[in-house]
Image (spheres, rainbow, N blue to C red):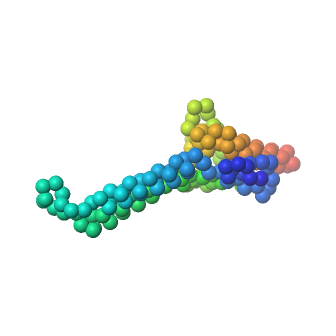
Amino acid sequence: MAARGGWQTGGVSDSELVRLKPRRIRVVCWVSAVALLVVFTAVATSLTGATGNGYGTFQRGDQFAMVGLGVLGALAILLFTRPRVEADARGVRVRNVIGSYELPWEVVRGVRFDRGAPWASLELHDDDLLPMVALQAADKETAVEGVRALRRLHQAHLATLSGGASAR
């Protein structure tokens, strides 16, 4: 089932795939990247003629360099749109700004979203915390729905483990 904001939540089935992306930061990053590119392009078009006391002049290459710097800056901003989380019955895949992780549910102790925390995290059995930047507090209720969906998948996995153990 698709919920508002592109978040998938709902009941747990064997084929359920939960895909989570932050909403608010994506909008902010795209607007900021476009604004930065516009500013650098405007500065580039104003780079003409002599500098200061005439010791040098701006060339066409200087203008292209300014636009190029704007493109690089915009791409750096867009890196913050990279985070996402995908989970299914087998495990969870977390992609943050830098680094990606693929974990089976067996190594996950729980899904945490502590009060005041900027984003949710996975608590692992080795006492590590893996941040999930895709589930941000700024997204409010949609982030909470995403955490609940992950918790349902985790609980379903724990239930299959305990069901398999009792069948032996």
| Residue displayed at 51% across by 53% down | 30
Q: Nearer the viewer, residue 138 or 92?
A: 138
Residue 58 coordinates in the image, percent (x, y): 22, 63
Q: Is residue 136 visible?
A: yes
Residue 73 coordinates in the image, percent (x, y): 40, 55
Q: Nearer the viewer, residue 23 or 110?
A: 23
| Residue displayed at 38% across by 54% down | 39
Residue 3 coordinates in the image, percent (x, y): 73, 49
On the picture, is 27 further left or further right than 33? right
Q: Is residue 111 visible?
A: no
In the rendered image, the residue lying farthest to the top is 115
| Residue displayed at 27% across by 60% down | 47
Q: Nearer the viewer, residue 46 or 29?
A: 46
Residue 17 coordinates in the image, percent (x, y): 72, 55
| Residue displayed at 73% across by 45% down | 149
Q: Nearer the viewer, residue 124 or 37?
A: 37
On the picture, is 36 further left or further right than 151? left
